[in-house]
């Protein structure tokens, strides 16, 4: 990637008058955006012009690509107001209905990012209604779901409205179908774990720990995740998950929540209570070069329900079956969300 970026920049420096400059700028901007560097992507698009391209059709296509990349880069840079203004240029450059639908998607994203929720939902909802089996309709659903997942989390009423709409719609099309289904499965998994926690039985601590893992890694909400880890620790301060729970609280406090003093207190507590744990040893600077194979007992503790219990509380767990191993079950959207091939279908 670094060599590609260097080559594109060298070409632009050496041959500024070539007709290939337009598509080179687009290629450079796209790769910089993929590398999470939207400001450099915007810089690459400065002064974009397709005038030297002979084909009028190709000129229009390049102008549309540049305009949409500019909007995406502005959104990634946290500049939604500028992105919304730039959508008009993308819409004007759209050469067909598919391009116009993609411009509508960008407008919906910009409105949501600006906090103009009702307007953003209206724009995306109208697209779903008018093109229900077009790929862009599924992408509109994904944009709404991902926005409310990130901004409001799994308890969001708006997120749950979007998920219900997906269930009611049934059929979808396009490359985002699996992404949307994964979000549906993830929320189902969250609700199952929440039900286990609400039961206030011997599995509640493990359920709270799993909710912390899910809220942080899948919903990207560190403060809420820390609350779940604290809850898990309070429910079972001497259990097998305690070192991992304390480490998670400390790490989130130091690395994500700018609360180093609180985090260090938890790190010190690990050293006091569990000096031989991998977490305490890691804090002392020990490096683990090779992963130790999981024992049956460790896998049972990872599931959090004890020997012979069930991952969903209804049937025995066969730990000889790879489909029941937690990292397989979690791969595609949460516990139990497996592909037909994985479940033998």
Image (cartoon, rainbow, N blue to C red):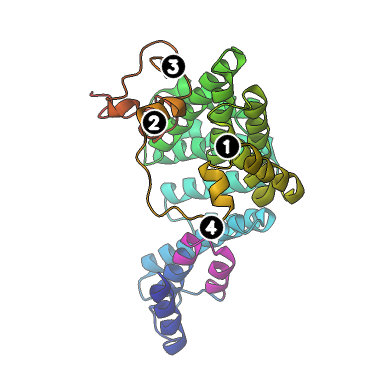
Residue 243 is marked as 1
- Tag 4's secondary structure? helix
Which mark lies nearer to you, 4 or 2? 2
Across and down, in percent, residue 121 comes to 61, 35
Looking at the image, residue 110 sits to the left or right of residue 21; the answer is right
Residue designated by label 2: 172
Q: Could you tell me if the residues under marks 4 and 2 are in contact, i.e. CB atoms within 8 Å?
A: no
User: Is residue 140 something that shows in the picture?
Assistant: yes
- Tag 3's secondary structure? loop
Residue drawn 59% across the image and 51% down it? 283
Residue 90 is marked as 4
Residue drawn 73% across the image and 50% down it? 260
**Sequence-wise first label, 2 or 1:** 2
| Above-or-below relation of 287 to 145 | below
Q: Label 3: few (<14), some or many (≥20) within 10 Å? A: some
Residue designated by label 3: 312
Is residue 32 inside the magenta stretch? yes
Q: Quadrant of the C terminus?
A: top left
Q: Label 2: few (<14), some or many (≥20) within 10 Å? A: many
The CA distance from mark 2 to mark 1 is 44 Å
Across and down, in percent, residue 291 comes to 38, 47
Q: Main secondary structure of the magenta part?
A: helix
**Sequence-wise first label, 3 or 4:** 4
The CA distance from mark 3 to mark 4 is 48 Å
Which mark lies nearer to you, 4 or 1? 1
State the extent of the magenta-drawn residues as a range. 31-46
The answer to which quarter of the image holds residue 205 is: top right
């Amino acid at each position: 990637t670094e060599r590609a970026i260097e080559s594109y920049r060298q070409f632009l420096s050496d041959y500024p008058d070539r007709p290939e400059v337009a598509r080179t700028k687009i290629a450079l901007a796209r790769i910089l955006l993929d590398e999470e560097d939207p400001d450099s992507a915007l810089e690459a698009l400065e002064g974009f012009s397709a005038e030297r391209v002979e084909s009028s059709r190709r000129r229009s296509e390049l102008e549309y690509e540049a305009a949409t990349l500019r909007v995406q880069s502005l959104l990634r840079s946290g500049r939604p107001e500028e992105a919304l203004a730039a959508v008009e240029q993308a819409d004007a450059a759209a050469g067909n209905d598919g391009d116009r639908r993609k411009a509508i998607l960008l407008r919906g994203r910009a409105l949501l990012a600006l906090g103009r929720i009702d307007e953003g939902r209206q724009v995306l909802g109208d697209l779903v209604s008018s093109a229900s089996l077009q790929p862009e309709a599924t992408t509109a659903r994904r944009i709404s779901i991902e926005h409310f997942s990130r901004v409001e989390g799994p308890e969001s009423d708006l997120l749950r409205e979007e998920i219900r709409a997906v269930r009611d719609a049934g059929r979808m099309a396009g490359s985002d179908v699996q992404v949307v289904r994964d979000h549906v499965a993830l929320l189902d998994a969250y609700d199952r774990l929440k039900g286990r926690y609400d039961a206030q039985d011997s599995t509640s601590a493990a359920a709270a720990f799993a909710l912390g893992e899910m809220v942080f890694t899948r919903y990207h909400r560190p403060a809420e995740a820390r609350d779940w880890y604290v809850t898990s620790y309070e429910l079972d301060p001497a259990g097998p998950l305690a070192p991992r729970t304390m480490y998670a609280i400390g790490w989130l406090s130091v690395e994500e929540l700018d609360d180093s003093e609180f985090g260090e207190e938890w790190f010190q507590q690990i050293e006091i209570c569990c000096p031989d744990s991998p977490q305490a040893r890691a804090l002392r600077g020990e490096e683990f070069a090779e992963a130790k194979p999981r024992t049956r007992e460790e896998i049972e503790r990872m599931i959090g329900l004890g020997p012979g219990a069930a991952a969903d509380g209804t049937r025995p767990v066969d730990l000889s079956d790879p489909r029941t191993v937690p990292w397989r079950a979690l791969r595609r959207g949460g516990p139990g969300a497996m592909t037909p091939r994985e479940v033998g279908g």
